[in-house]
Image (spheres, rainbow, N blue to C red):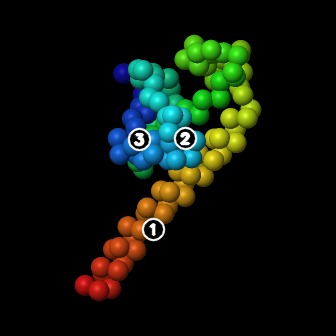
Amino acid sequence: MTPGYAVVSNDGPFVEFAQGVVQRVMGSDAYFELPSPIMGAEDFGYFLREAPGCMVFLGACPADIANSLEAPSCHSNVMRIDEAALAHGIALHVGIATEYLAAASATTDDVTTTTREG
């Protein structure tokens, strides 16, 4: 076997966390799971070896393409993007980062408080 890219294996609890952030930031109907796994090569798998996370697709398909699952892929020479979706992507990244850091800080504060009191 020839070594290649690391497998992108989403962390289940982080998927649930990201789903909640997507729904809070972009609306309750903004999240859906793809009907089947994707076998693309992606270097993001190396990051997921080091920390919990998940790959999230933004959904930047232009409105004139009725079914986003049939749109040309992002690595295609005929791919098109709805640039208005970039603002949604920024909001989603900020939401995930701030909520994750807030949760980590709350956990650290709990441990610190327990350590000081205990």
Camera-near label (1 vs 2) is 2
Residue 105 shows up from this direction: yes
Q: Residues within 10 Å of mark 1 (few under 14, many from 20)?
A: few
Q: In the rendered structure, which amino acid carries the disc numbered 2?
A: Gly
Who is closer to the viewer here, 25 or 93? 25
**Which element is circle 3 on?**
helix
Tell me where residue 50 appears, x and y as whole percent.
42, 49
Tell me where residue 22 appears, x and y as whole percent.
52, 42
Tell me where residue 11 appears, x and y as whole percent.
37, 42
According to the picture, the residue beneath numbered tag 3 turns out to be 15
Question: Quadrant location of residue 84?
Answer: top right
**In the displayed structure, does residue 28 sit left or right of residue 74?**
left
Q: Choose the circle earlier in sequence order: 1 or 2.
A: 2
91 w.r.t. 42: above or below: below
Q: Quadrant of the N terminus?
A: top left
According to the picture, the residue beneath numbered tag 2 turns out to be 27
Who is closer to the viewer here, 89 or 75? 89
How far, Cα to Cα, is label 1 from label 2?
Answer: 26 Å
How far, Cα to Cα, is label 3 from label 1?
Answer: 20 Å
Q: Residue at x 55, y 17 (%)?
A: 69
87 w.r.t. 83: above or below: below
Who is closer to the viewer here, 66 or 54? 66
**Which element is circle 2 on?**
loop
76 w.r.t. 27: above or below: above
Residue at the farthest right position? 83
**Which element is circle 1 on?**
helix
According to the picture, the residue beneath numbered tag 1 turns out to be 105
